[in-house]
Amino acid sequence: MDTQGKELSQDALAQLAAVIESRKAAHGGDPQSSYVARLLDKGPDAFLKKIGEEATEVVMAAKDLDHGGDPAKLVGEVADLWFHCLIALAHYDLHPQDVIAELRRREGTSGIEEKALRKAVLREAQER
């Protein structure tokens, strides 16, 4: 993806995050008229349950692709998952840029090495 495409992707996530932020009760979000405000009002159990449901639907759509399923279904389910993850980030006063920064931090790092490092850090913390 070129630089312009990356900027557009980040802009789209930032714009969606701003809309979600505006749905918080502190910004006048109304649970009676906004799905996002309703999930935020119900608390973490509500949006975390949705994240679990959407993750399962992503898995099912991906598995269906192995048997002639529609790629658009997978894209739609991933969009739903990302959307609900953005709600979780907003609840915890985090932003898509925080996730992008973490992905950039990991860039060029072997996934195998990164996982081994996380395990080593966890072991060290447990030994203290």
Image: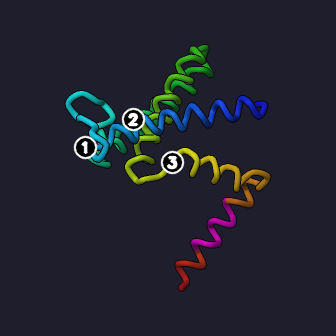
Circle 3/circle 1 CB separation < 8 Å = no
Residue type beneath disc 3: His
- Give the quarter of the image for residue 38: top left
Discs 2/1, front = 1
Instruction: Note whether residue 52 is visible.
Output: no
Badge 2 crowding class, 10 Å Cα cut-off, few under 14, some 14 to 19, many 20 or more, is few
For the view shown, which residue lies furthest in the left direction?
32
Q: Position of residue 82 (x, y in %)?
A: 50, 36
Task: Determine whether 86 is above or below 78 in the image.
Answer: below
Q: Position of residue 117 (x, y in %)?
A: 68, 66
* Label located before the other in sequence (3 or 1): 1
Foreground: 84 or 125?
84
Residue stretch in magenta: 115-122
How far apart are labels 2 and 1 at the CA level?
19 Å
Identify the residue under disc 2: 53
Residue type beneath disc 1: Asp
Indicate the quadrant containing the N terminus: top left, top right, bottom left or bottom right: top right
In the structure shown, which secondary structural element does the residue marked by tag 3 occupy?
Answer: loop
In the structure shown, which secondary structural element does the residue marked by tag 1 occupy?
Answer: helix
Identify the residue under disc 3: 95
- Give the quarter of the image for residue 32: top left
Residue at x 70% of width, y 60% of height? 114
Residue type beneath disc 2: Glu
Q: Position of residue 19 (x, y in %)?
A: 42, 34
Residue at x 41% of width, y 39% of height? 51
Badge 1 crowding class, 10 Å Cα cut-off, few under 14, some 14 to 19, many 20 or more, is some
In the rendered image, residue 119 lying in the magenta stretch gets the answer: yes
